[in-house]
Image (cartoon, rainbow, N blue to C red):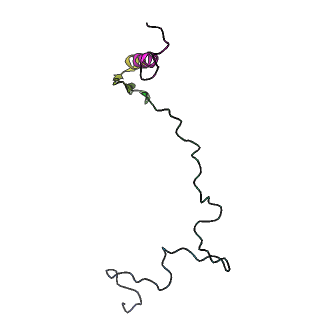
Amino acid sequence: MSPRGHAPANSPTLTPSGASPAEPAPAPAGSGAPKVVAEGVPSVLRSDPHGDDGRQPVAWLRITAPGRGVTPSARSWCACGRDLFAAGQARALALIADHEQHRELCPHITPQEGRKAA
């Protein structure tokens, strides 16, 4: 130790004697069992309220319209391999309409059984 009563900056930190921080805290007097979780915290896993219902995303449409003076754009992609991009207001609007039509026709999205052939 230095003459001022604290360890120099490049020496290892001294550990205090006593319980290690990794050990559970002692239980209140008389219970004997170590405290594992804080009061009010469930210790049993509950079912996920947002659980998997079997649905998965198949087609995506991303529209970017940042504001005045900046060119809007749209991107449409699907699990079937579709990946289209359009820049400019007229082209982005056309791609949005095309994406909606694709969602009605794509076999990855709409099952073909029971549908009339076009």
Q: Nearer the viewer, residue 113 or 93?
A: 113
> Count the marks: how many?
0
* Residue 34 colored in magenta in the image: no
Q: Is residue 64 visible?
A: no
Residue 6: name its quadrant: bottom left
Specify whether 47 is left or right of 1: right
- Outermost residue on the left side: it is 10
Q: Quadrant of the N terminus?
A: bottom left
Magenta stretch? Answer: 94-118
Q: Nearer the viewer, residue 22 or 85?
A: 22
The spot of residue 87 in percent (x, y) is 35, 23
Residue at horizontal 60 percent and vertical 71 percent from the top = 35
In the drawing, does residue 35 fall left or right of residue 96?
right
Vertically, is 29 above or below 77? below
In the rendered view, tell whether residue 28 sits above or below residue 103.
below
Q: Judge by depth and name the residue closer to the eye, 106 or 83.
A: 106
Q: Is residue 101 magenta?
A: yes
- Name the quadrant of the C terminus: top left
User: Relative to 13, is 25 on the left or the right?
Assistant: right
Position above or below: 7 against 58: below
Residue 43 relative to residue 77: left or right:
right
Residue at image location 65% in from the left, 61% down from the top: 40
Q: Looking at the image, can residue 19 be seen? A: yes
Q: Residue at x 38, y 81 (%)?
A: 13
Q: What is the x, y in percent for residue 43?
A: 59, 60
Q: Quadrant of residue 15?
A: bottom left
Q: Residue at x 45, y 31 (%)?
A: 57
Most extreme residue toward the right is: 30
- Percent from the top left, x then y, of residue 30? 68, 80
Q: Residue furthest front?
A: 113
Rendered image quadrant of residue 69:
top left
